[in-house]
Amino acid sequence: MNDIRRELAVSKRIENLLVARNLRGMQSVQSSLKPGYCLRAARQLLSCTGRVLIGTGFPVLDTFESDGPAGAIALYRVLEQIGAEPILICGDVLANAIGGDYCVARVPLGRPAGLRQQVTDLLADYQPELMVSIELAGPAGDGHYYNMRGEDISSGTLCFDVFLELSDCPVIALGDGGNEIGMGNVLEKLSELAIIPSVTTCDELVIADVSNWAALGLVAMMSYCAGEDYLADWDNRAMLEYLACRGSLDGITLDNTLTEDGLPSETGKALVNSLRDLIADSGVEYPG
């Protein structure tokens, strides 16, 4: 078992690495968060033995963004390894794209009549131990959902915040810009950014320059805490290829490319290598 002070030091290093590029102002937002949020979130994930609902799939045109699903799948894989039961919550397009490979639950986009009852029924059926939101728009103060361009996407977004409203289980939220679920935790700081912020809060917020990277940072932290290299077989390019072949678009360029938020797959690969080096330098000993 790693000493708590060492774990906290590793968490801080991961947290700083995740916002090092400061692409959308998350480095300035970081000061509003209590250090150690990666550690606290990783511990919650590692303690799970039951169902974990992972909401993902930011709308881009008539399909889904590459940022979000990749990180959701990274967490999904680790949760399966530790004996939990992850379920991806997404809209029809993403569910059709990946449902043959992962356990998914479909939820209609927007807020159609009957949505709250459907979510109530899903929660009663699944009885989640934990919920994770990654790169999903949360409602702003006016109740509408906005993308980074300030466009109202309410009718086409996955309103995962309804799950939060109707459940009392813990929630981890991952985001990179300020308009995502969970960003209500740092609402005052977001007033400094050119964004229509989400007001939805969460139990633990993890921020990064790219939301996928927040998930990979959590996987790295879980690796350190558990003494297992959960990033060893993560191939960033292969995952982006998998999603691109199924219709994903880059949320910045709106192109069907092997990129996430305008950054090539090699950038994500470099981040994974840096995370693994960070953990190795921290003295973790993996079995075998």
Image (cartoon, rainbow, N blue to C red):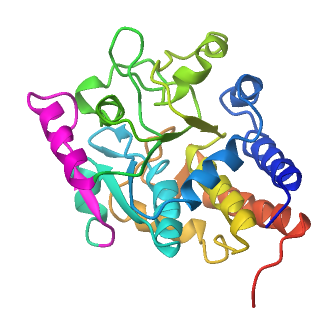
Residue 218 x, y percent position in the rendering: 64, 54
Q: Quadrant of the N terminus?
A: bottom right
Residue 240 located left or right of residue 96: right
Residue 259 x, y percent position in the rendering: 55, 53
At 40% across and 62% down in the image, what residue appears?
50
Residue 243 located left or right of residue 20: left
Residue 118 located left or right of residue 131: left
Residue 179 x, y percent position in the rendering: 49, 25
At 52% across and 55% down in the image, what residue appears?
71
Residue 278 x, y percent position in the rendering: 84, 61
Start-end of magenta stretch: 101-126
At 58% across and 15% down in the image, what residue appears?
187
Asked whether 241 falls inside the magenta stretch, the response is no
| Residue ranking furthest to the left | 113
- Say above or below: 193 vs 7: above
- Say above or below: 242 vs 20: below
Q: Say which of 134 and 171 sits in front.
A: 171
Asked whether 114 falls inside the magenta stretch, the response is yes
- Say above or below: 83 vs 124: below
Q: Say which of 57 and 261 sits in front.
A: 57
Q: Say which of 34 and 91 sits in front.
A: 34
At 38% across and 46% down in the image, what residue appears?
55
